[in-house]
Image (cartoon, grey):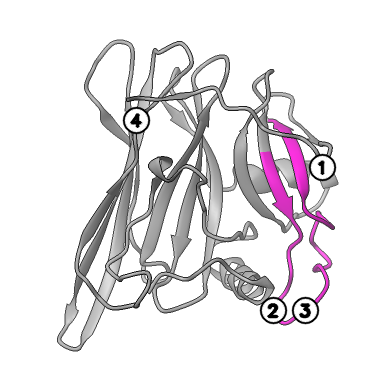
Amino acid sequence: MKPSIPSILLIAIAAVSSHLLFGSQVQPRPTSKDKSLSANASCYDVATGKLVGSRTSRTSVLVSPDGSFRAYAESDAVAAGLANRPECSNTSRLFVAGRDSRKFYAVLTIKPSPESLGNSIDLTDWSPKGHRLLLAQGFWQYGSDVGGTRVRIYDADSDNLSSESLMDEAFSRYVGKTCAAIFQPLGFSRNGSAVVRAEPYFGYGEDKAAEDSCVQKQGFWLVDFAIPTVRQLADSYEPRHYGKVAP
């Protein structure tokens, strides 16, 4: 069964596991306020935890502000396994169609691994200028509290997808050392910088932030990858959205 919204304990468990398996960036699994922009499927019923079989989740189409590019994500949860030992695994894909073609093509495919059978893609927003798509790439292990999110950016003009360690690298440069934190993408600023929510990183069983946590409390941050620079925003900051959901 897919894990529920994590507590501090869950974050700690996820953090330790992700340090061992995926690197330092660890976060709660993505939760989109707009469910139409979240491709997050499961073979299990959320209320009962009962296996109900294979399912597919697909987002609405998100259109760039100038209408040049369109994107959607899809996640297939497939139930399979030995008798009395059913398993569920996901394959998630991001599709984009550009100005030169009305046909969508996959620019990102996330396949299950033994350590994280579940995965998802949440579309966050298109940048106000240029054609950069901010997204949350989620991962988790069924039957476990292990899970997290990676913040990524797809540049439709160059057909380039950022690395999974994009946010880790930006904050590590900012603090001048390896950075451990929890990140969630929120959108873009008017000048095109990414806006994220950052939270402290807790070690397993700890009630205070880990020594290598570069964030001491939850807050909003502006990340400009072109310069590069990282700057904290006011707690009252409200992200704007520029992309349009196709009818």
Please tell me whether residue 89 is drawn above or below residue 242 in the rendered image. below
**Image: magenta residue range:** 196-224
Check the picture and name the quadrant holding the N terminus: bottom left
Q: Tell me, for residue 204, which label it has, or none.
A: 2
- Residue under label 4: 61
Alpha carbon of mark 1 to alpha carbon of mark 3: how far?
25 Å
Q: In which quadrant of the rendered image does the C terminus lie?
A: top left
Cα distance, mark 3 to mark 4? 41 Å
Q: Amino acid at mark 4?
A: Val
Circle 3 sits on which residue? Answer: 206
Left or right, 228 with respect to 93, comes to right
Q: Is residue 162 visible?
A: no
Instruction: Quadrant for residue 59, please give it.
Output: top left
- Point 84% across, 47% down: residue: 175
Q: Residue furthest bottom?
A: 84
Rendered image: mark on residue 235:
1
Q: Is residue 187 visible?
A: yes
Which numbered disc, 1 or 3, marks the residue that appears first in the sequence? 3
Which quadrant holds residue 47?
bottom left
Q: Earlier in the sequence, mark 2 or mark 1?
A: 2
10 Å neighbourhood of mark 1: few (<14), some, or many (≥20)?
A: few
Q: Earlier in the sequence, mark 4 or mark 2?
A: 4
Within-10-Å neighbours for mark 3: few <14, some 14–19, many 20+ = few
Q: Nearer the viewer, residue 212 or 244?
A: 244
